[in-house]
Image: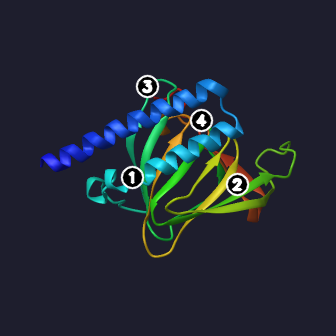
Amino acid sequence: MSILVDVAAQRARACKTFMAQVHSTEAKEGITPSTLHALKLKLVALAKRSDLFPLADFAMPQAHGRSHPLLVEENDGHGLYLSISLPGKEAAPHDHGIWCANAAISGRERHVFYRRTDDGRKSGSAEIAQVGEVLVEPGNGMVMADHDIHSTVVVGDRPAVGLALYGYALARFPSVTWFHPEFASVRATPSRRHAA
């Protein structure tokens, strides 16, 4: 029992230390491409400490995926989560409306990145083009700025387990925009900014 409590306490301390580093990095430059890259590297380093994140401490998803809060700040603070996505889980192209970083603990998840190619004038319509991709696996991560667009799919036969850092906690997300390239359409979910 004391070993389990010790791992949980170590994990909590490591997450608090990590978040202090995030705020220190942000305070120096604000959120810029170089800041986001630095945050990704810090998140990858935390994810490499897999002993802090034993799967036995986290319930597996009932369906495709599940996010476990590790450190969720008050008000407009950041959210750090451990996410578990089952093999084959995928998400259509979308933008979170806020920056985020992901780093793998185990498993592999492919992130495909897009840019919008239309002018956004026609309501409910959008065109996007693929501009890159990255395989998030142990020792690797990805980062997105506000309104960057990506799709995801878990590849292989193992769950993708990783850490996710968001500019806002999930409960306070801005509107998420979903793109449907096969129909040249787009839809937005309601903002949670004032719901929490």
Query: Can you tell which mark lies on residue 174?
Result: 4
For marks 3 and 4, the one nearer the N-term is 3
Q: How is the image coloured?
A: rainbow
User: How far apart are the two marked residues, 2 and 3, measured between alpha carbons?
Assistant: 30 Å
Q: Residue at x 46, y 33 (%)?
A: 19
Query: Can you tell which mark lies on residue 49?
Result: 1
For marks 3 and 1, the one nearer the N-term is 1
Residue 133 seen: yes
For marks 1 and 4, the one nearer the N-term is 1
For label 1, the crowd category at 10 Å Cα-Cα, with few meaning under 14, some 14 to 19 and many 20 or more, is few
For label 2, the crowd category at 10 Å Cα-Cα, with few meaning under 14, some 14 to 19 and many 20 or more, is many
Please report contact status of discs 1 and 4: CB closer than 8 Å, yes or no.
no
The residue carrying mark 3 is 74
Secondary structure of the residue carrying tag 1 is: loop
Secondary structure of the residue carrying tag 3 is: loop
For marks 2 and 3, the one nearer the N-term is 3
The residue carrying mark 2 is 179
Q: Position of residue 194 (x, y in %)?
A: 53, 26
Q: Position of residue 140 (x, y in %)?
A: 56, 58
In the rendered image, the residue lying farthest to the left is: 1
* Residue type pointed to by label 2: Phe
